[in-house]
């Protein structure tokens, strides 16, 4: 029995972590234009000393989302400043986010650019780029954009929220 103990411990750990490699807060690139820090940093998590480390499924989604965000970045031709990307379920509850938020899945990004936000909004809205939702917050001069793993299910909804 003793010689199987290590295997058993590994299996149990695997069940809880999902086996996949997760990402840590670092300057390591997760795509052409984005770093792990940009995807995981949360002011709320920092303030309340909460962990904001994704499990393997959300990690996969973050890489996928970064690949999609690279296309947005390339299309806009200007750096994208991330306000909020991944949120652990706890962090999401703390910020008052809806429980089915795409941020929890790692598939939504809140961002701004140095370009005129109205111009950016219209440029994205009229583009051939796909997304599930694009929300423009004119008062904060920010955007929320979300994606789906199945691109054909994306709604391409764009609207302004005052
Ligand atoms: Zn958002």
Image (spheres, helix red, strand yellow):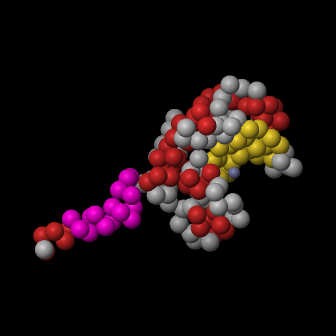
Where residue 135 sits, quadrant-wise, is top right
**Which image quadrant: the N terminus?**
bottom left
Where residue 100 sits, quadrant-wise, is bottom right
Give the x, y percent position of residue 104. Answer: 59, 56
Report the side of 31 relative to 139 (left or right). left
On whether residue 128 falls in the magenta region, the answer is: no
On whether residue 14 falls in the magenta region, the answer is: yes
Report the side of 26 relative to 112 (left or right). left
Residue at 58% over, 64% down = 89
17 relative to 120, above or below: below
The stretch in magenta equals 7-21
Of residues 28 and 135, the one nearer the viewer is 135
Q: Residue furthest front?
A: 153
Residue at 59% over, 67% down = 90
Give the x, y percent position of residue 162. Answer: 87, 49
Residue at 69% over, 30% down = 76
Report the side of 149 relative to 117 (left or right). left
**Dominant SS type (magenta):** helix
Q: How many marks?
A: 0
Give the x, y percent position of residue 153. Answer: 61, 37
Report the side of 145 relative to 159 (left or right). left
42 relative to 80, above or below: below
Give the x, y percent position of residue 130. Answer: 65, 32
Question: Is there any visible trace of residue 51 in the rendered image?
Answer: yes
85 relative to 129, above or below: below
Question: Is there any visible trace of residue 38 in the rendered image?
Answer: no
């Amino acid at each position: 029995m003793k010689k199987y103990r290590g295997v058993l411990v590994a299996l149990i750990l695997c069940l809880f972590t999902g086996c996949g490699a997760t990402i840590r807060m670092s300057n390591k690139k997760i795509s052409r234009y984005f770093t792990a820090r940009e995807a995981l940093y949360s002011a709320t998590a920092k303030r309340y000393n909460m962990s904001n480390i994704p499990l393997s499924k959300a990690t996969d989604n973050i890489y996928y989302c970064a690949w999609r965000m690279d296309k947005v970045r390339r299309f806009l031709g200007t750096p994208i400043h991330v306000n909020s990307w991944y949120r652990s379920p706890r962090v999401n509850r703390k910020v008052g986010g809806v429980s089915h938020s795409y941020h929890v899945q790692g598939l939504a990004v809140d961002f701004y650019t140095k370009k005129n936000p109205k111009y950016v909004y219209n440029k994205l809205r009229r583009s051939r780029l796909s997304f599930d939702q694009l929300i423009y917050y004119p008062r904060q001069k920010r955007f929320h954009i979300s994606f789906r793993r199945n691109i054909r299910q994306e709604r391409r909804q764009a609207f302004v929220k005052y």
